[in-house]
Image: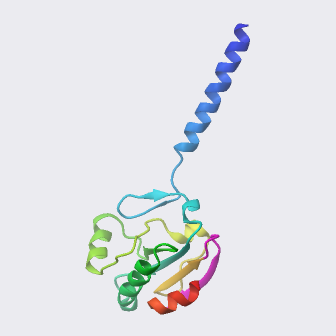
């Protein structure tokens, strides 16, 4: 009787430990501002990831277009900005304010997340469909209208 009870307790402990490990796993990505999550959270919406840098004038020029597109399409599209120079912390926050990057900024390298190489030039925009498949790689500045045409 004791061994049956001990076995059940050990089994329950193993299941609880496994569930705790799953719930405590590291997130796949982190955003500036502290939010984080897993890749599955991107499914169900179009995902637009834009690589930019402060030394890239076309990158800075397209920021209002990205913001306008994002604000108008928030229900169906998530737009993320990724700093090509991999800035983080205060340095990134200063540039976000200085260059009016008013879309969420992802800190985790999207290339590492999705398995693509760094873009050959900037600005670069990657568009993933709601199923998470990369369907467009755009090099050069985009406009609100050009982005709309890729998700229609």
Relative to 26, say whether 127 is above or below: below
Residue 135 visible in image: yes
Q: Position of residue 143 (x, y in %)?
A: 45, 91
Q: Quadrant of the N terminus?
A: top right
Residue at 37%, 58% in the rendered image: 34
Please tell me in which quadrant of the rendered image residue 84 appears.
bottom left
Q: Quadrant of the C terminus?
A: bottom right
The answer to whether 140 appears left or right of 4 in the picture is left
Residue range corresponding to the magenta coloring: 129-140
Residue at 50%, 68% in the rendered image: 109
Count of numbered badges drawn on the protein: 0
Residue 118 included in the magenta stretch of the image: no
Residue at 56%, 79% in the rendered image: 127
Relative to 37, say whether 55 is above or below: below
Residue at 41%, 71% in the rendered image: 86
Of residues 132 and 88, which is closer to you in this image?
A: 132
Q: Position of residue 55 (x, y in %)?
A: 35, 86
Q: Position of residue 63 (x, y in %)?
A: 37, 84
Residue 142 visible in image: no
Colour scheme in use? rainbow
Q: Position of residue 123 (x, y in %)?
A: 46, 86
Relative to 102, say whether 24 is above or below: above
Please tell me in which quadrant of the rendered image residue 98 appears.
bottom left
């Amino acid at each position: 009787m004791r061994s049956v009870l001990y076995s059940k307790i050990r089994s329950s402990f193993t299941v609880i430990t496994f569930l705790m490990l799953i719930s405590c796993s590291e997130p796949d990505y982190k955003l500036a501002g502290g939010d984080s999550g897993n890749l599955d959270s991107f499914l169900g919406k179009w995902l637009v990831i834009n690589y930019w840098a402060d030394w890239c004038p076309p990158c800075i020029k397209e920021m209002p277009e990205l913001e306008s597109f994002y604000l108008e399409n928030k229900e169906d599209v998530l737009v993320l900005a990724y700093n090509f120079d991999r800035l983080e912390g205060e340095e990134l926050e200063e540039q976000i304010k200085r260059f009016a990057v008013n879309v969420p900024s992802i800190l985790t390298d999207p290339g590492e997340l999705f398995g693509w190489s760094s873009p050959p030039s900037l600005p670069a925009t990657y568009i993933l469909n709601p199923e998470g498949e990369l369907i467009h790689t755009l090099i050069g500045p985009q406009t609100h209208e050009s982005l709309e045409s890729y998700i229609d």
